Image (cartoon, coloured by chain):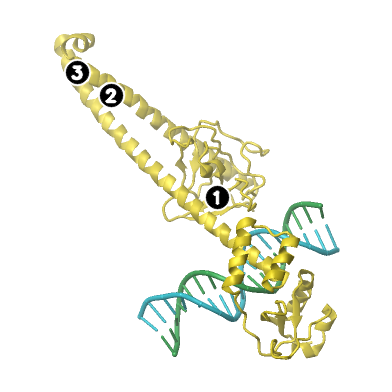
Chain colours: A yellow, B green, C cyan
Amino acid sequence: MEPGRLIFNTSGSGNGQMLFMDCGAGGIAGAAGMFHRGVRPVLGGMEEGRGVKRPFFTSPDDMLEEEYYDEQLPEKKRRLTPEQVHLLERSFEEENKLEPERKTELARKLGLQPRQVAVWFQNRRARWKTKTLERDFDRLKASFDALRADHDALLQDNHRLRSQVVTLTEKMQDKEAPEGSFGAAVDASEPEQAAAEAEAKTSLADAEEQAAAAEAFEVVQQQQQLHVKDEERLSPGSGGSAVLDARDALLGSGCGLAGVVDSSVDSYCFPGGAGGDEYHECVMGPVAGGIQSEEDDGAGSDEGCSYYPDDAAVFFAAAQGHSHHHTDDDDQDDGQISYWMWN
DNA sequence: TTGTGTTTTATTGCCTCC
DNA sequence: GGAGGCAATAAAACACAA
């Protein structure tokens, strides 16, 4: 049998929409498989709506008849009318999944094949998902940028305070020499300086806390990288990609940002609460065997993974201009969202 | 008018659920 | 195993700048 061109009628009697496809041996098999989805291939080149009835195939066996594969001129694929799209949009707003009854009803109203309605909903869900991803990414990026700015400001503050401490310490040492006692200088002679010093010490403590957190972050990241390397050594096929469950971060309700970060991903600290000032309920852990699925990436539940303390840090892989990926298998917002980002 | 990028409609293959 | 969902992809239709 010669490979040829099939033309399919994908419409109801009113619309006459068609498409064509080149069919090799595999194409025929694929086309036969379309029957269970309700697509009816027709002999091409016959024009519907001008009194010529299209001869539909009645079974896959018909498709094996050589006459059906003659080269034919394809009809153009036609778009839905604005009215049809409007009704479909309204229906989609009500419910983005299509039950069989609703599909049949819509198809009847619109003069389309039920299959066309199903395809439209499928594509519409895909577009909706893309939009949602873009919005989520923009939100996360804005959040990340704000936090990075905050982090940079803290670093500067830290630097300024350290300089201040050095200056004050030198001054105190200068005073200590003639008067012989640090306490005397503080108590009696210079109360303003004492106050400034106390404030500086408090700020320094905060700054050092931040520095310690950053250090802890570094340590955990190193551990993470070591762990990933071990995993890679043990299972050469594994990819070790980063998967981040950003559910609660996206919803802005506490942290719950459980991440997996590998050595190829920039990592940053993220605060947990909506107010951006807490690190809580945030865990991270390595993934055994490469990319985790959305179903099994629950933090703290995977066997064979070591987990770090809740308050260690939150890790978030992102940076300006990075590519990103996010999936949410369930279109009904179940809040289970995964990300991976890279340079 | 034409080249090019984007959107829309549809197919294919794989997966999950019942 | 059938039905339906999704990701990836093809191709027609459309938009728009040069």
Name the chain letter of the residue that bears numbered label 3. A
Distance in Å between CA atoms under marks 1 and 2: 41 Å
**Helix, strand or loop at disc 3?**
helix
Locate residue A150, reporting x and y percent.
36, 39
Is A188 placed above or below A158 here? Answer: above
Residue A137's disc is none
Name the chain letter of the residue that bears numbered label 2. A
Quarter of the image for the N terminus of chain A: give it: bottom right
Assess whether mark 2 and mark 1 are in contact (beta carbons under 8 angstroms): no
Which amino acid, by three-letter code, is at mark 3?
A: Glu
Which amino acid, by three-letter code, is at mark 1?
A: Tyr
Q: Residue at x 42, y 30 (%)?
A: A212
| Residue corresponding to mark 1 | A339
| Residue corresponding to mark 2 | A200
Q: Residue furthest left?
A: A178
Q: In the image shown, does A263 or A54 lie closer to the viewer?
A: A54
Q: In the image shown, does A238 or A251 lie closer to the viewer?
A: A251
Badge 3 or badge 1: first in the primary sequence = 3
Which amino acid, by three-letter code, is at mark 2?
A: Ala
Distance in Å between CA atoms under marks 3 and 2: 12 Å
Label 1: few (<14), some or many (≥20) within 10 Å?
A: many
Is A244 placed above or below A108 here? Answer: above
**Helix, strand or loop at disc 2?**
helix
Locate residue A195, reporting x and y percent.
24, 18
Q: Residue at x 20, y 19 (%)?
A: A193
| Residue corresponding to mark 3 | A192
Q: In the image shown, does A286 or A40 lie closer to the viewer?
A: A40
Q: Residue at x 66, y 90 (%)?
A: A73
Distance in Å between CA atoms under marks 3 and 1: 52 Å
Q: Residue at x 30, y 22 (%)?
A: A201
Q: Is residue A308 left or right of residue A148?
A: right
**Helix, strand or loop at disc 1?**
strand
